Image (cartoon, rainbow, N blue to C red):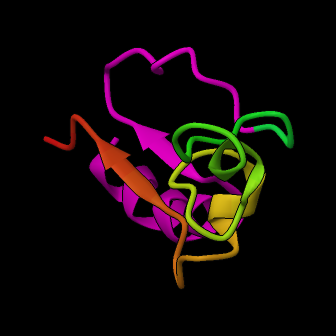
Amino acid sequence: DLDAARELLPLLELKAGRILFGGWPTGVEVSHAMVHGGPFPATSDSRTTSVGSRAIERYLRPVCYQDVP
């Protein structure tokens, strides 16, 4: 299994935003509607959000490793 994981992990890094190792996802969908920014009008300002599809544009490598052994 370890040899297969060594080959598979680099491929998953190119395609996925989160790689889980024996865990469960948060349940938060990465979508255009998901924006956190504070009270209006900041709620609709995607330049400062840390969630949702617009946040992906703010980070260089959008890969999250969760529960890595």
Relative to 35, 28 lies left or right: left
Residue 5, horizontal then vertical, whole percent: 40, 52
Relative to 20, 33 lies left or right: right
Which image quarter holds the N terminus? top left
Residue 35, horizontal then vertical, whole percent: 67, 42
- Work out whether 32 lies above or below 9: above
Which image quarter holds the C terminus? top left
Outermost residue, left direction? 69
Nearest to the observer: residue 67 or residue 50: 50
Residue at x 53% of width, y 77% of height: 59
Task: Tell whether position 5 is magenta.
Answer: yes
Task: Tell whether position 60 is magenta.
Answer: no
Residue 10, horizontal then vertical, whole percent: 52, 71
Q: What stretch is highlighted in magenta?
A: 1-30
Total tally of numbered discs in the picture: 0
The quadrant in which residue 20 appears is top left
Residue at x 22% of width, y 34% of height: 67
Residue at x 38% of width, y 64% of height: 6
Residue at x 64% of width, y 51% of height: 42
Outermost residue, bottom direction? 60
